[in-house]
């Protein structure tokens, strides 16, 4: 399993990774360093000495909050146990680090939390373990992530705790997706859904995973069913709704409803500043604009996207953006720009071992090398699409709902 870096070393790497002249979060880096050092220090102290050290922490290091982490067991209220409360407090800070792309400090913090809760109750231990796995996955350390998620599944199965087991299965499903193993991804998300608390976070995540599989397999009616279920379960105007709306727009794009799809992607960009969501929305918006032959809009979108990619520390999403950008420019056609974007995609996919993206990049390379000037993309249908009758009611209703949301 991956060893966490010392706090100062983790801070140094994160400061470089997220550095950019226009980033306004540098003040947060110092605060997060203090949090990471506090977690590190606490985990190294004897249990008897920890309360005194906690009392010495100023409110600026670990301020009180009524918030809870996003990763909690469905149906549980806020914990009353001191250790569980402390674990949640550190995990809230770690989630803020994750959102900013400061994964080394987040990993160091969560590794310390796992040591702190080593003798706590099952739920507290497994939530911290699953959270550590999520950070490891974002760092590209799939072996550590798999160890964490498998531990959650094993422990939860032994203790007969289906919602916790679902959480581990969801993590393993995300790993299968990043490895390009779609049958295993579908199996794991189906298993998670079967164990999920109805209407809770685990059901929402499982439905979201199944939507991604359905999109990849061109089962568009299923994708819309899963997607709108997630949208209705998610917090109004929050990150999850933004992400799922992006996936719904992608479904519309694949179904040939290009105008509502582009409207959906632009709406996502207007409602969230989270870079991992924005990069995917930018890439798919480029593809939609390319289908409309709107080069001016493509240039405008890509200019902003490239600036954001330079300061984002989300390699999978950035690689996915360059995949979409390559496809968009190649279909326009503009082979010269497509080749530049493809080179960036190949570099990222190779460096981070994104196997499915690497396979798709290889296919694009063969196309670009074989055909110097591709045929222009066939004109897309306008809204409402002439081919609308080919789709069942579930698809057309879902697309209409997206169009209404995005206008």
Image (cartoon, grey):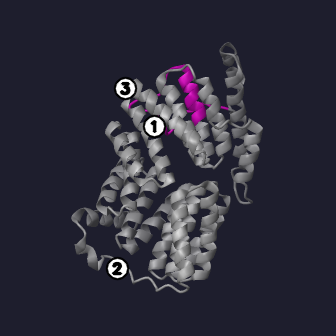
Say whether residue 56 is visible. Answer: yes
Could you say which disc has been placed on residue 232 in the image? Answer: none
Q: Which badge, 1 or 3, comes first in the chain's sequence?
A: 3
Q: Is residue 174 above or below residue 335?
A: above
Our reading of the magenta stretch's main secondary structure is loop
Q: If the image is split into quadrants, where does the C terminus sit?
A: bottom left
- Whether residue 5 sits left or right of residue 292 in the image: it is right
- The residue lying toward the viewer, choosing from 141 and 26, is 141
* Residue at image point 39% right, 52% down: 183
Per the image, label 3 sits on a secondary structure element best described as: loop
Q: CA distance from mark 1 to mark 2?
A: 42 Å
Is residue 81 on the magenta stretch?
yes
Please indicate whether residue 272 sits to the left or right of residue 36 in the image.
left
Q: Earlier in the sequence, mark 2 or mark 3?
A: 3
Disc number at residue 160?
3
Q: Quadrant of residue 2?
A: top right
For label 1, the crowd category at 10 Å Cα-Cα, with few meaning under 14, some 14 to 19 and many 20 or more, is many
Q: Percent from the top left, x then y, of residue 267?
A: 46, 64
First of labels 1, 2 by sequence position = 1
What residue is shown with label 1?
Answer: 168
Query: Residue 45 vs residue 91: left or right?
Result: right
Residue at 55%, 58% (x, y): give it. Answer: 317
Distance Cα–Cα, label 2 vs label 3 = 51 Å
Residue range in magenta is 62-91
Q: Give the foreground label among 2 and 3.
A: 3
Residue that mark 2 sits on: 381
Along the viewing direction, whichever of 244 and 211 lies nearer the viewer: 211
In x, y percent, where is residue 404?
A: 34, 65
Q: Residue at x 52, y 27 (%)?
A: 125
The residue nearer to you, when weighing 406 against 83, is: 83
Question: Which image quadrant is residue 248 in?
Answer: bottom left
């Amino acid at each position: 399993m991956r060893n966490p870096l010392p706090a100062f070393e983790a801070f140094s790497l994160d400061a470089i990774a997220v550095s950019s002249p226009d980033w306004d979060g540098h003040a947060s880096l110092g605060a997060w360093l203090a949090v990471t050092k506090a977690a590190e220090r606490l985990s190294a102290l004897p249990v008897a000495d920890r309360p005194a050290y906690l009392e010495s922490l100023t409110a600026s290091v670990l301020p009180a909050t009524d918030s809870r982490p996003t990763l909690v067991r469905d149906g549980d209220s806020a914990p009353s146990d001191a250790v569980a409360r402390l674990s949640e407090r550190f995990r809230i800070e770690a989630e803020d680090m994750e959102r900013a792309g400061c994964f080394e400090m987040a990993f160091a913090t969560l590794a310390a939390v796992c040591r702190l809760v080593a003798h706590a109750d099952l739920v507290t231990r497994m939530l911290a373990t699953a959270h550590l796995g999520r950070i490891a996955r974002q760092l590209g350390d799939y072996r550590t992530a798999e160890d964490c998620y498998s531990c959650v599944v094993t422990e939860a199965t032994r203790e007969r705790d289906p919602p916790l087991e679902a959480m581990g299965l969801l993590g393993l499903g995300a790993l299968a997706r990043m490895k390009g193993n779609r049958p295993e991804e579908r199996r794991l998300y189906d298993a998670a859904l079967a164990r999920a608390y109805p209407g809770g976070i685990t059901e929402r995540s499982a439905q979201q995973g199944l939507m991604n599989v359905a999109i990849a397999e061109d089962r568009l009616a299923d994708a819309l069913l899963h997607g709108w279920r997630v949208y209705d379960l998610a917090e109004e105007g929050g990150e999850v709704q933004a992400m799922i709306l992006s996936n719904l727009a992608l479904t519309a794009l694949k179904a040939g409803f290009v105008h509502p799809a582009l409207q959906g992607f632009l709406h996502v960009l207007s409602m969230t500043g989270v870079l991992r969501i924005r990069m995917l929305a930018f890439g798919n918006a480029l593809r939609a604009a390319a289908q409309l032959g709107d080069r001016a809009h493509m240039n405008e979108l890509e200019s902003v996207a490239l600036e954001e990619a330079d300061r984002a520390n989300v390699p999978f999403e950035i690689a996915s953006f360059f995949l979409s950008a390559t496809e968009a420019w190649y279909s326009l056609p503009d082979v010269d720009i497509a080749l530049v974007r493809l080179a960036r995609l190949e570099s990222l996919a190779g460096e981070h071992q994104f196997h499915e993206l690497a396979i798709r990049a290889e296919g694009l390379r063969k196309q670009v090398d074989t055909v110097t000037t591709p045929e222009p993309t066939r004109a897309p249908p306008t809204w409402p699409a002439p081919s609308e009758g080919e789709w069942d009611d579930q698809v057309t209703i879902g697309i209409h709902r997206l169009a209404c949301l995005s206008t």
